């Protein structure tokens, strides 16, 4: 009886193992269906195309100004006032110095600037005698042909850095300009500006008057230009705007 049972077990055991190995699994059954491979291919292709679109979109999309917190005006938008002022400051041409009078043709240079390179005749004309002393003239004197008083204008825009009454040179106005030059106006009357005021090129700042230093010159304007860096005098006629 025991031998029969053992024989039965020997016959059934291989069948059991063979049966387990030979039976198709659920996965194999699924793969055996005809629609599986086409569906898998379509799904894989869709995933690949989606990844490609995402990659291309990420590579070509630029970061917006709003994302960076930056606001830049377009050409169609109106720029702020300070932006427009900055553009004007950059693009505008620098001011040129004009004659400090309205009508240059009505005036003469009564005393020239003392230039060491000028002729002896010009040098002699540019010497001012005050008392017993001769002093080189570091400016030009402008005088109306008829000897009358005339308006004195700011030769260049700037800030009034001095307004004084001097017993020798008379009333004086000094204007400091942004280009590193200083213009000085002496022998004035009826001064119309105060220290610290901002003036524009062509503004009337006074009238021509008299002084003791150039008493013999009568009513005139003593006009000089200096470099702010070292206070060196510059011949005004070399930098004045000839068109004025």
Image: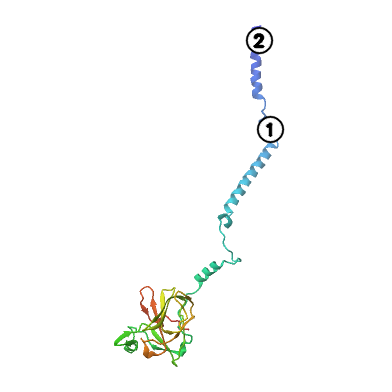
Residue 14 position in % (x across, y down): 64, 18
The disc, 1 or 2, on the residue closer to the chain's N-terminal end is 2
Residue 81 seen anywhere in this rendered image of the structure? yes
Q: Name the residue that disc number 2 marks.
A: 5
Toward the bottom, the furthest residue is 146
Residue depicted at x 67% and y 29%: 26
Q: Work out which residue is located at the far right of the displayed protein and give it.
A: 34
138 with respect to 92 (left or right):
left
Residue 185 shows in this picture: no
Question: Considering the image in quadrants, where does the N terminus appear?
Answer: top right
Residue 58 image offset from top left, x and y in percent: 58, 51
Residue 107 falls left or right of residue 74: left
Q: Which mark is residue 30?
A: 1
Between 48 and 114, the one nearer to me in the picture: 114
How many numbered discs, if any? 2
> Could you say where residue 94 lies in the image, as x and y percent from the top left?
47, 75
Q: Position of residue 24 (x, y in %)?
A: 67, 27
């Amino acid at each position: 009886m025991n031998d029969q049972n053992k024989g039965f077990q020997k016959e059934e055991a291989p069948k059991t193992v063979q049966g387990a190995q030979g039976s198709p699994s659920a996965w194999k059954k699924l793969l055996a269906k005809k629609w599986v491979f086409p569906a898998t291919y379509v799904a894989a292709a869709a995933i690949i195309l989606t990844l490609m679109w995402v990659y291309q979109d990420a590579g070509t999309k630029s970061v917006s100004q709003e994302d960076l917190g930056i606001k830049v005006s377009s050409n169609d938008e109106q720029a702020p006032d300070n932006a427009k002022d900055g553009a004007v400051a950059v693009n505008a041409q620098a001011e040129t110095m004009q004659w400090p009078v309205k009508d240059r043709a009505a005036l003469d240079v009564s005393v020239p600037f003392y230039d060491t390179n000028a002729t002896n005749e010009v040098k002699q004309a540019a010497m001012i005698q005050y008392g017993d002393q001769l002093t080189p003239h570091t400016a030009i004197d402008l005088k109306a042909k008829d000897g009358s008083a005339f308006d004195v204008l700011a030769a260049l825009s700037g800030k009034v850095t001095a307004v004084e009454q001097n017993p020798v040179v008379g009333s004086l106005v000094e204007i400091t300009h942004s280009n590193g030059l200083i213009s000085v106006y002496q022998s004035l009357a009826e001064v119309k500006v105060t220290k610290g005021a901002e003036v524009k090129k062509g503004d009337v700042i006074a009238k021509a008057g008299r002084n003791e230093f150039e008493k013999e010159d009568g009513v005139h304007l003593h006009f000089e230009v200096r470099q702010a860096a070292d206070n060196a005098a510059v011949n005004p006629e070399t930098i004045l705007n000839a068109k004025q």
